[in-house]
Amino acid sequence: MTIEQLKYIVAIAKYGTLKDASEDLHVTLSALSQGLNRLEKELGLTLFTRNRTGSSITKEGKVIVNHAKKVLDSLDDLTEVAQVMQNRLTGTLKVASIPGPFFKLFTIVQQMKSIYPEINIQIREQNSQTMIEELQSEKVDVALAVYNDEDIQKNPDLTFTKITSCKMLIVAHQDSPVIQNNHTVTDELIKQPVIIFDDKMVIATMNEIKYAFGRNDIVISVNNPHIVQQYVEENKAYTVGLDLTFTHSKSFMQNMNFAKIDFLTTIPVEHTFGIVTKANRHETQLMKEFAYELKKEFKDYVKEITPIEQ
């Protein structure tokens, strides 16, 4: 039994055909077939049933392939640990984050790049729903998302690690009539334009506000959080969003009034901000290092957002 043979069966299980597996591994079809035959003979088991459409994994094959994945993951871990010891960690990590905490990631990336110059960390700003979908399809490795108990129940294939709690706020320019005395929401809520970030939790909150206060016909939904902030700063509209979305910008909050949304009845008022990963996906050393730095960096961030509560 060789490491190459373990890679062969994992690839065949992934692609379903010897041809596609051989192309992915950059080996000849003959070499792949012979390696599989030798391994099956050594184990005394049939791992795949060959047919015209491809190779179907057997019941015994599923068990063996799962063990093969664990062996290969352990070998990768061993290599990566050695790289960490020599500050030679490599690899690519794809990270997605909601607006607000996004800026914190640059600090983490700079710190990690100074230690491991050969790593590549790609960061994108997205809404939580898109991040969860891309985690499941493995387009994203790590997500910084906002979620609630319903999301956890609906996605048993994901791992949710809490960083802090967060709340929805109504935020308006200090000259806007929407909020008075820093916390009192007025009837102007249904008369003034509102601009929101295109996120399912924000939209659900806005719908609940409509139910409680009445319909607002001037609602703008955009996927660019900077446009949201610009409109509110220019007092063209108020917005609804999570507290941690706004607190990173002290200059922005200095000119704003904000109010907690404590009148909702059908959806949660409090949500959770945290790290989300795919549960059954192997956690590389780069992912572990990033998660460690993430939690360390956000310890201070949690302290920053708590004063917003009134």
Image (spheres, rainbow, N blue to C red):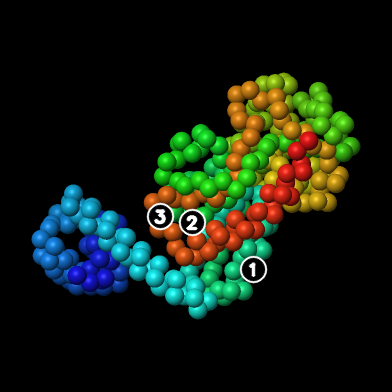
Using the image, tell me which numbered label, if any, was put on residue 281. Answer: 3
Q: Position of residue 115 (x, y in %)?
A: 58, 74
Relative to 17, does residue 163 appear above or below in the rendering? Answer: above
Local secondary structure at mark 3: loop
Label located before the other in sequence (3 or 1): 1
Crowdedness near tag 1: few (<14), some (14–19) or many (≥20) residues, C-alpha within 10 Å? few
Residue 158 pos. (x, y %):
45, 46
The disc, 1 or 2, on the residue closer to the chain's N-terminal end is: 1
Q: Whole-Å distance between the Cαs marked 2 and 3?
A: 9 Å
Q: Answer whether labels 1 and 2 touch (C-beta < 8 Å).
A: no
Q: Residue at x 82, y 25 (%)?
A: 186
Quarter of the image with the N terminus is bottom left
**Mark 1 is on which residue type?**
Gln
Q: Find residue 116 and report its horizontal and vertical position in percent.
A: 55, 74
- Mark 3 and mark 2 in contact (Cβ < 8 Å)? yes
Q: What residue did someone put label 2 on?
A: 141
Of the image marks 2 and 3, the number of the one nearer the N terminus:
2
Q: Nearer the viewer, mark 2 or mark 3?
A: 3
Q: Is residue 261 visible?
A: yes
Please, what is the three-letter code of the amino acid marked with disc 2?
Asp
Residue 110 shows which numbered tag?
1
Contact, mark 3 vs mark 1 (Cβ under 8 Å): no
- Vertical relation: 267 (above or below) 127: above
Q: Residue at x 51, y 34 (%)?
A: 150
Q: Residues within 10 Å of mark 3 (few under 14, many from 20)?
A: few
User: Quick check: can you spot residue 126?
Assistant: no
